[in-house]
Amino acid sequence: MLNIKKTMMTALVAAPLVTSGSLAIAQTVNVGAAANVGGMIVFVAQAKGFFAANGIDAKVVLRNTGGALTKSLRAGEMDYAPAAFTNLPAALERGLNLRGFVGYTGGSFLKPTSDNFVGIAARAGTGIKSIQDLRGKKVGVTFASTGDLYLRTVLEKNGIKTRDYKRINTRPPSLVSVLDTGGVDAIVAWEPNLTRALDKIKGSQLVLRGGDYVCFCAGLHGSPEKVYGDRKKTQGVVDAMAQSAAYIRDMKNREEVAQIGARFLRGVSTDLIKRTMPNIVYDVRMGENTKKAFNFSVKQLIAQKKMKKPYNPDKYFDFSFINKTMKDHPEWFADLKK
């Protein structure tokens, strides 16, 4: 995976460590998050004291890609970390032993595809107006990422084979600059880089956003030892995530939430966060459609020869924690479709 500069951010939150009216002993937990607006649930849970209120002394550890998060998780630098369903199954097939216990981002509870978070932007003067115009062009994309699977799937479904265009491996922080300087004709980027590119590069245009080609969805997971070694701790993390997601979805909190995001994401403005957040689904629920989203990705990975055979999602998912949260705190989900 990519060689990226690691960034660790630790925030101390002055909040009472109280759950259900009784004093709770705080347990230190290193929670991984992606360094983009997809990590807002973790950021807000930390900044607003939702982790602390559930007895969790959380330290947020940022990485730029899902691959980097998984690498840090395996190295013991994190207790829990997210990974997108679009690539996770391949790692599980190779022997990675994890249990996904709460949603991190994406709308997989309601449907098996959800990808407005990602899109394709083209530079002016390239002649790219549609997907078909990508033939013979250079496309910047982060290899082995959700964006990569999105690009391959979009082009394949539009009759464009891999030999008809050239993929250029590009780190997420470099996507905007490589498009701006003419290193590529188009990029595949997730937010906030997609909107940032359209803002910065004169004449650039959005070729495609989303389209239900993949599920840009992720769950928070950990090793069985971490998830089940202290179920109360894991449940506290789930409760905090659910409360945070509800806080984010409440529009009256949008300005404050964007300010929190800007504190965690260096170089990303509050305004940019506010404009990109509507393209992301902040819903931590998981259910049968989540399994379908997982299986949808598996089929794509098999077709692209990144996996050999189907993988049983029940070996990865454990819905018992989020189901308990949904039962105990229906108020945190009252605004969501069922």
Image (cartoon, helix red, strand yellow):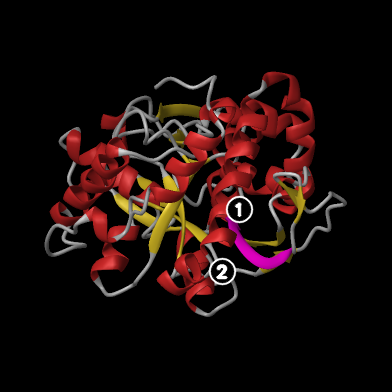
| Nearer the observer, 81 or 223 | 223
Q: Which mark is residue 79?
A: 2
Mark 1 is surrounded, within 10 Å at the Cα level, by few (under 14), some (14 to 19) or many (20 or more) other residues, namely many
Mark 2 is surrounded, within 10 Å at the Cα level, by few (under 14), some (14 to 19) or many (20 or more) other residues, namely many
From this view, report whether residue 9 is shown above or below residue 76. above
Is residue 28 magenta-colored? Answer: yes
Q: Earlier in the sequence, mark 1 or mark 2?
A: 2
Residue 268 position within the rendered picture, expressed as x and y whole percent measured from the top left:
72, 43
Left or right for 75, reference 271: left
From this view, report whether residue 17 is shown above or below residue 277. below
Per the rendered image, the range of residues in magenta is: 26-35
Q: Is residue 188 visible?
A: no
Residue 275 position within the rendered picture, expressed as x and y whole percent measured from the top left:
65, 26
The N terminus appears in which quarter of the rendering? bottom left
Secondary structure beneath label 1: helix
From this view, report whether residue 155 is shown above or below residue 42. above
Q: Nearer the viewer, mark 1 or mark 2?
A: 1
The C terminus appears in which quarter of the rendering? top left
| Nearer the observer, 58 or 302 | 58
Q: Quadrant of residue 334?
A: top right
Q: Which mark is residue 169?
A: none
| Nearer the observer, 266 or 102 | 102
Residue 145 position within the rendered picture, expressed as x and y whole percent measured from the top left:
40, 55
Residue 274 position within the rendered picture, expressed as x and y whole percent measured from the top left:
69, 28
Residue at x-position 16% and y-position 61%:
305
Residue at x-position 63% and y-position 46%:
240
From this view, report whether residue 317 is shown above or below residue 323. below
Q: Is residue 22 visible?
A: yes
Secondary structure beneath label 2: loop
Is residue 303 magenta-colored? Answer: no
Tell me the residue that label 1 is attached to: 236
